[in-house]
Image (cartoon, rainbow, N blue to C red):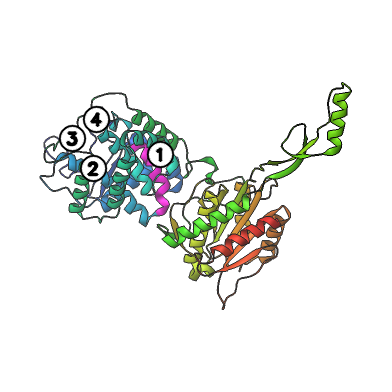
Amino acid sequence: MDEAGRPDHQPTRRPRHRHPRRRRPTRLSYPATAEIHIDADLIADPTIADPRRPAHRSKAPVAYGVLLHECAHVIHSTWDPPPGVPPVVREAALLLEESRAERSYRDTRPRDRRWLRRAVTSIIDPTDTPTDTLWSAAYAAGLLLARVDAKILYPADVRTPRRQITKVLGRKLLKGLRGIWREAQTVGDTDAARMVELGERWCRLLGIDPTASPGLPADDAATSAIAAAIAAALDAILHNPADTPAPESGGPRTDVPGIHVDTDVPITWTERDPSDAERHAANRLTALLRRARHREPTRTREPSSAPPGRLRTRAAVTLAAQRASGAIPTAQPWQRTVRRPVPDPDLTVGILIDASGSMADFAKPMSSAAWIVAQAATRAGATTATLAYGDRITVLIPSGRRPATVRDMQADASTERFVEACAEADRLLHLSTPGTARLLVVVSDGHYVNPDESQATITRLHHTGCAVLWLAPANESWPPRAYDHTTIITVDDPTTCVNLIGHAAIDALNRA
């Protein structure tokens, strides 16, 4: 301790808020001693402050998320800006460190995303962006939008702030900043030089020369639309306890007896950008599904009193007689064909992915097939949701959200809860309710412990008009099990058999 009573060791690095009216710190961490301090105001009741107990975490989610955020800094923020770095570059580098540390932590503990998401409501202060200047808008983007790419926040969480930030920065500048923070999220824990270099690039992209203007840009107190948008977004996250941005996106449910649905990650996966072949396959399947939804205009013949059209002799004679007798002419001597557009029917697509151990050798191509179908169905205007089922059921891609990355899953579950997964997909998408074109895509080998119950579930969906498309791995030594009332396609490389998938989907929908 120094003479003022402050700790000799410095807290872990994070962006120092510039605004003089900021809130007092709610957390501090000391890497030298692995000591973390959390503000007691985040925990309403001291009797629920044990982070080792799941019940306590649920009662104080923000405090537990802040604790994990500080753990991320203690573990991964092991670099220091060297002396002599201009303050503006230091500030930008530390800003990039926020999402980098959380991304590194989440890569090793993906189930903690729900807590880190709630911690944002305490970590980010809207008054950090007091003006709608380029620097403040970029600072808000680095704190908020970067956490979307770090897989902490969801795109829907930041929809309103993103609009305000884009108004100030413009799309081109925001794209450049995004490239910097995404690159920062790949930097190692000890690479200080790289982080400082990215901080300098950040400044120069904003038109700041760190050599000529090393100090932080001045922020005059003013009303900020960005700050208001951030405050509204944080309030929405705080009052939404589910680990998804929308109530319909498949958060924990208790209204289906016997089904445990969890948006945490019960299986292991790695996320990657789709390959060019996968993108092309998704484009082709999108075109096929749009063609399946399209309905040709109807043609009807209607009588008319004036051309164009085909003249009917008898009606023409009747019209001439009516006119000659002074009667009101009612005959319509012309007949024409009228084309009226038919609205495309609504399309609902549910995707179920088998994560049991029998799919281990085929998990990668099956994950690719699931992404292609989900991407194409969403782009074709369909309502979709993707679920994985094994020991538990997980909503991977909620309804209304287009998958941005491919999730290469590791299939290691000890069983497969197919019947319960169908029930949850039905509850989310109303697959058994007539009125729309409905398709259930199952990615599985079909080897279940309860094949009779699985067949009964498929038959029940079939009788309600829901088509079932079955994508099975091409395995000669362990051929897939065939179920009645399904269209089965064996898949080895999804990008090369997408036409088969598309035509099978069209046939299944036409027969439903």
Q: Are marks 1 and 4 in contact (CB under 8 Å)?
A: no
In three-dimensional space, the C-alpha distance between marks 3 and 2, rounded to whole angstroms, equals 15 Å
Q: Earlier in the sequence, mark 1 or mark 4?
A: 4
Q: Earlier in the sequence, mark 3 or mark 4?
A: 4
> Is most of the magenta stretch helix, strand or loop?
helix
Residue 115 appearing in the image: yes
Nearer the camera: disc 3 or disc 2: 2
Residue that appears at 19% across and 50% down: 197
Q: How many residues crowd mark 3 within 10 Å: few (<14), some (14–19), many (20+)?
A: some
The quarter of the image holding the N terminus is top left
Percent across and percent down for residue 506 are: 63, 57
Q: Tell me: residue 175, above or below residue 216.
A: below
Q: Is mark 2 on a helix, strand or loop?
A: helix
Please tell me the numbered disc located at residue 205: 2
Nearer the camera: disc 3 or disc 4: 3
Nearer the camera: disc 2 or disc 4: 2
Residue 387 appearing in the image: no
Q: Name the residue under label 4.
A: 19
In three-dimensional space, the C-alpha distance between marks 3 and 4, rounded to whole angstroms, equals 11 Å
Please tell me the numbered disc located at residue 158: 1
Q: Is mark 3 on a helix, strand or loop?
A: loop
Q: Which of marks 3 and 2 is nearer the N terminus?
A: 2
Q: Mark 3 points at which residue?
A: 216
